[in-house]
Amino acid sequence: MTKVAWQIDGAVRSVFLNRPEKRNALDAEMMAQVQAAFAKPPGEAERVAVIRAAGPVFCAGLDLNERSARPHGASPIENMLHAIEHYPLPVVAVVQGDAIAGGNELALHCDLVVASTSASFGMSLAQIGLAPSWFLAKKLLEAAGPVTTRRILFLGDPIPAQRLYELGVISHIADPDQLERVADGVIEQLSANAPLSLKVMKALILREMAYRDQIAHEDVDRLVELVRQSDDAQEGMAARLARRRAAFKGR
């Protein structure tokens, strides 16, 4: 079976991450497939899109075995997340397990997140010598606010879904055995709402939050790229893959 499967069934477009043996870590093929799933405009009967994942982990982020080989300046994950964020109808993430780094961003770029109480969310970039791009940090600030964003980025430790629900970062929480029931209820409610209203509301929200894109940030982009190319980044990724503690030297 493909690493990403998607289909349209009546009102619902379903996208399914299916790489459980790699904790649904996103490689280039998966990101292209997810992007393609959201590139096709919704049909007349569609009302909502849903992202789910196989196995105990929602998404462990980018596949570190591919990350160091990423072409300079290319950002497949940003292209994928942009397609999700700008899909004309609401997108729901059903998060049954941990959503880390790129997985955290994948969930937060959806309009609503229905998460299991057993799930955690986090960005471990500082622990492997990397930094988020302007695009990724912007979404964290929108969803979590400055205090929680600092905690997520500076410390790098996962935060339980229950706590993020209490902080208003994610929209719904459920015990593991009730997750699908709660998610289905949200999906059914969205499916029953007026599609033109949903489309206009989503467009309004996106436009009103778009002002951060207009802030000059080319200098920050250059700094992020320097971090990505640093010796510390290579050491951090090698240490994470080897399951050892990284020895950062600040260069």
Image (spheres, rainbow, N blue to C red):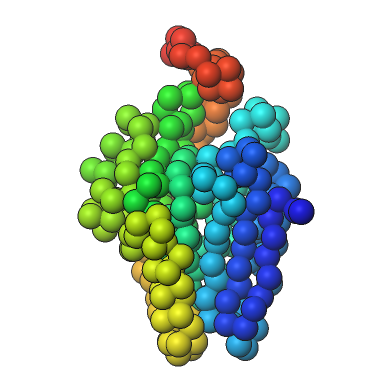
**Is residue 239 depicted above or below 224 in this figure?**
above
Please identify the quarter of the rendering in which residue 197 is found: bottom left
Q: Would residue 151 be found to the left or right of residue 205 on screen?
A: left
**Is residue 145 depicted above or below 93 in this figure?**
above
**What's the residue at 28%, 51% (across, down)?**
162
**Is residue 129 depicted above or below 224 in this figure?**
above
Q: How many labels sit on residues?
A: 0
If the image is split into quadrants, where does the N terminus sit?
bottom right
Decide if residue 111 is in sight here.
no
Decide if residue 68 is in sight here.
yes
Q: Nearer the viewer, residue 19 or 113?
A: 19
Q: Nearer the viewer, residue 226 or 106?
A: 106
Residue occupying the far right of the picture: 1
**What's the residue at 41%, 58% (across, down)?**
177
| Image coords of residue 68 (percent x, y) | 65, 28
Q: Would residue 219 be found to the left or right of residue 229 on screen?
A: left
Please identify the quarter of the rendering in which residue 81 is found: bottom right
| Image coords of residue 76 (percent x, y) | 64, 47
| Image coords of residue 18 (percent x, y) | 65, 51
**What's the residue at 45%, 44% (across, down)?**
98
| Image coords of residue 16 (percent x, y) | 62, 59
**What's the residue at 51%, 63% (across, down)?**
85
